[in-house]
Image (cartoon, rainbow, N blue to C red):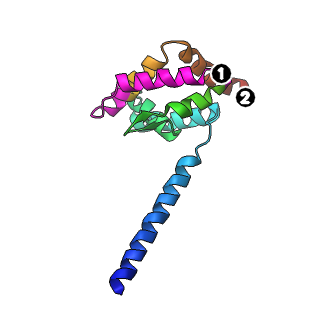
Amino acid sequence: MNRLRLEIICWSCLLIAMAVSTEAASVWKLPTAQMVYEDLEKCRQESLEEDAHTLRCLVKKIGLWTDESGYNARRIAKIFAAHNQMEELMLVVEHCNQKEQDTSHLDDWAFLAYRCATSGQFGHWVKDFMSQKEVER
């Protein structure tokens, strides 16, 4: 009887943990330029101004990166949905993510994949997005 109760408690805890993590994953919100700048400043301080580490810190904080799978192309595309090229952007991000994937050097993976993806039109969109903070002032 006690063993059964213990199993029920364990399964209940597992189900609650799964529900909480699923809910947390679905609550992601589009970052604003202001949010990005604030997180960027925190990451710069944490990483002692090292570019690759700063970038990975930032994209993790705003929910665009995981160390297991790299960039989340769908979330990135949602940020730039107004450009009406979500599918193309997702393909570029996924291509660069896979091309540069290196799970033993996560900072380099994040940095090189970012540089790859932003080498074209997407790079201009990122600059425009970040310049929105200047307009908000």
* Left or right: 134 in relation to 49: right
Q: Secondary structure at mark 2?
A: helix
Residue 18 position (above or below residue 86)? below
The quadrant of the picture occupied by the C terminus is: top right
Residue 125 position (above or below residue 105)? above
* Left or right: 46 in relation to 79: left
Between marks 1 and 2 in the image, the one whose residue lies nearer the viewer: 1
Check residue 89 for magenta coloring. Answer: yes
Q: Position of residue 120 (x, y in %)?
A: 51, 12
Q: Position of residue 31 (x, y in %)?
A: 61, 36
- The reply to whether callout 1 and callout 2 are in contact (CB within 8 Å) is no
- Looking at the image, which residue is at 57% across and 47% down? 26
Name the image quarter holding residue 70.
top left
Q: Which residue is more in the foreground, 63 or 89?
A: 89
Residue lying farthest to the left in this orientation: 104
Q: Counting other residues with Cα less than 10 Å from the Cα at mark 2, is it few (<14), some (14-19), or many (20 or more)?
A: few
Per the rendered image, the range of residues in magenta is 82-109
Gap in angstroms between the C-alphas marked 1 and 2: 24 Å
- Looking at the image, which residue is at 49% across and 55% down? 21
Check residue 70 for magenta coloring. Answer: no
Identified by mark 2, the residue type is Glu
Q: Which residue is more in the foreground, 57 or 83?
A: 83
Identified by mark 1, the residue type is Asn
Q: Position of residue 16 (x, y in %)?
A: 49, 65
Q: Earlier in the sequence, mark 1 or mark 2?
A: 1
**Label 1 sits on residue:** 84
Q: Secondary structure at mark 1?
A: loop
Q: Position of residue 103 (x, y in %)?
A: 30, 34
- Looking at the image, which residue is at 58% across and 32% down? 37
Q: Counting other residues with Cα less than 10 Å from the Cα at mark 1, is it few (<14), some (14-19), or many (20 or more)?
A: few
* Left or right: 59 in relation to 78: left
**Label 2 sits on residue:** 136
